[in-house]
Image: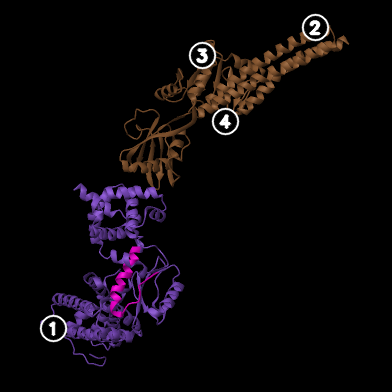
Chain colours: A brown, B purple
Amino acid sequence: MLTVAIAVALLPALLGWLPLAVWIGRGRARREGIDLPSAKGLRRARAVDLVVLDRWGTVTTGELRVSAIESFDPDDERNLRWFAGALGHAAEDPVARAVARLSARGKLTSVQRHGGDGISGSVDRHPVRLGRPEWLGMPAREVVGVTVGVQVDARPIGYITVADVVRPDARTGIERLRAAGVAAVLVSDDSERNTRHLAETCGIDAWHAGIARERRDQLIADYRLRGHVVAVATSSGTTSGDLPLSDSTAPPATRQPAGIHLADLDVNRIATAFSLSRSTARTATRARRTGLVAGLLGAGAAVWGLLPALVVAVLGCVAVVAIASAPAYETSRRSRSVTSTSSA
Amino acid sequence: MTETQDHETLPGSAQWMLTSLEPQVKDVAETMTRRVQSALTDLAGPVDGRRYRLIYTAIHNAMRVFIDRALGRSTPMTALDDLFRKMGYREAGTGRDRTTIERALHLVQNELWDLLRVLAADNELSAGALNAVGEMLSDFFAHLDEQLALGHESGTTDRNQDVGVARDRLIDLLLTGGDPDAVSTQASIARWEVPERITVAAIDVDGEGELEPGVLGREAIVGKGRPQLVLCDAAAFEDVSRQIKEALPRTRITHCWPIAAADVAEAWKWVTRAVELVHSHVIPKRPVIDCARYRTEIWLHAEPVMRRQLAQELLEPLFAESENSREILSETLLVWLETRESAPAIAAKLGVHPQTVRYRWKRINELFGEALHDPDFVIQLTLVLKASVPLWIAGDQSDFQLYRSTRER
């Protein structure tokens, strides 16, 4: 009889050892477009104090947009849009994709790509060149973004500037990370002027311009050497850093069980992922401890009889379940409210 | 002089001199033949040629007969007379008069007389004997000249009754606007009734030979040269065209719309111009080209010098552009001048985007400015562009070369 009473009394401790909090936290996170990592990853997430944000897709939408069109002759603006846009369809780089959205496709012939200089081709038999102003013999433009010159029939007709599309709630996301004790570092393959402008717009204090992929890994290693636990958010995928954050566009080989996989690398989603990971890990610990305490109390009560032990066990189980589920639910509700505030 | 005519007896010294000439007849005939051919270009030809042999035979035979008869031998004249009449006849057959052949005869007579005088001096022949030889020689050549005239007259008569010759003459008369009576006479001999409405066609043969006159029967008359002229009744043109195609499948027939006989010369100008425009790619190459479809092109290219000067004057702004730009701007300008349609409609015609047309139109306005509002300028511009653009597209660079050379001066 006494053995049965003790066994019943220890049920809360057994329940506390089950990963109820992790299961519930994962369910909540999935609804936010976040795949939480393994238990090891959750522990790492708690320790992260710095996140490296790739320019593409984190604080920006990952696309460029035409921010300015300057035609030398005001009557040429439509011609500028048409010829540059039609030629832009022949290239795949982000600048050309942004320019291509200015017009429909046209009849293109003799298309040639000139490395980093630009692209040339004939649109409806008119020779068109689109590229670095210096390459076209045009004065360079000192403005934020990437400016390309446009030449039609060997005559320069104007400039087109394209720039990052900054996420409207990027600054909020950075602030949430900072509040969670995670410093954001912006890494960009763009020029210093453009990177500085982007960092200032988003409220990021630390930024690195002109960083290619190889140099990015070195930069992360440097931060780790300085004692930081580094999370890395990049759509190009990475195996460097302590906690990789990847999205659906990341190469499968770079996806790790210990990393966090997100629907996209929106900095707000990253902040939510950190918040959920940490609260889930914390809640799991708390549920385990509560179950242990309730089990010990129940065992003591069993000495006095079966009924008190049964009452303590039931109360202990209820307490464990309540602790395991409540924080995750609250976190989820909070993250939703941040998103809706940002959108407004 | 006849075969049975008795000869005056030459003095013995003269007979001796002519006898000594006999072995040299062959060499003398060869020398004279060469002299005739070098002196008269119409009779020139290679030493082993047919013409050389004919002249040599005539001279050789004439000398032999003359010497024989001078020495009192009874050599008949029949064969020699026949030879000279045939020569006259043949000359008439080629359409030439007797001038050339008579000059040749006189040349031979003079050469022979010179030779006889030298021989007379060498042999100390008396003046009387030499005169007797000279008189005989004159009579002999006068007789030969008479035979030539007879042959030529006979040839001319026959030629005037020849259908082929009459057709050639008829074509010449129609192409030169000849006298209607002459046209009627030749048409009658040619056995081709001049129709009320005539179709003038040109057969442009690409290495396929020539259309034989007999191929088209009596329905059409065929000229010579290239392109080859064909005249037929307008109502029968389809049949004639089919017959030409059967005879020369790869030939191109360029024909005019039906015209009156008096307009054949003008129609031939239009047709030959159309053939030239086909060669210069202004008119597309097709097996049968109806000039009625290309009246504008034929008209505009009637004055090539004026077109070139107008182009230099009116299209100067375009000439300063690059070749590609010039071509596409002029093409767009011409379509706009001809249609006056909207940018999307012109774009659809040219197969480009409407914004491309708007861009081109902006450039055209920059180049020509206010002139495009002047109706006279616009009419001239339309004509000169219509005449010039197809030439440029076909690769004719002469307008731009002229512009550049004028600018460099």
Q: Amino acid at mark 1?
A: Asn
Which residue is identified by label 4? A249
N-terminal of the pair, mark 4 or mark 2, is 4
* Magenta region, residue range: B253-277
Frontmost of labels 3 and 1 is 3
Contact check, label 1 and label 4, Cβ < 8 Å: no
The residue pinned by badge 1 equals B131
Q: Horizontal and vertical percent for residue B152?
A: 26, 84
Q: Secondary structure at mark 4?
A: loop
Q: Main secondary structure of the magenta part?
A: helix
Q: Give the foreground label among 4 and 2.
A: 2
Q: CA distance from mark 3 to mark 1?
A: 137 Å
Gap in Å between the C-alphas at discs 3 and 2? 54 Å
Tag 3 residue: A222
Question: For residue B146, what is the image quadrant?
Answer: bottom left
- Asked if residue A122 can be seen in this view, the reply is yes
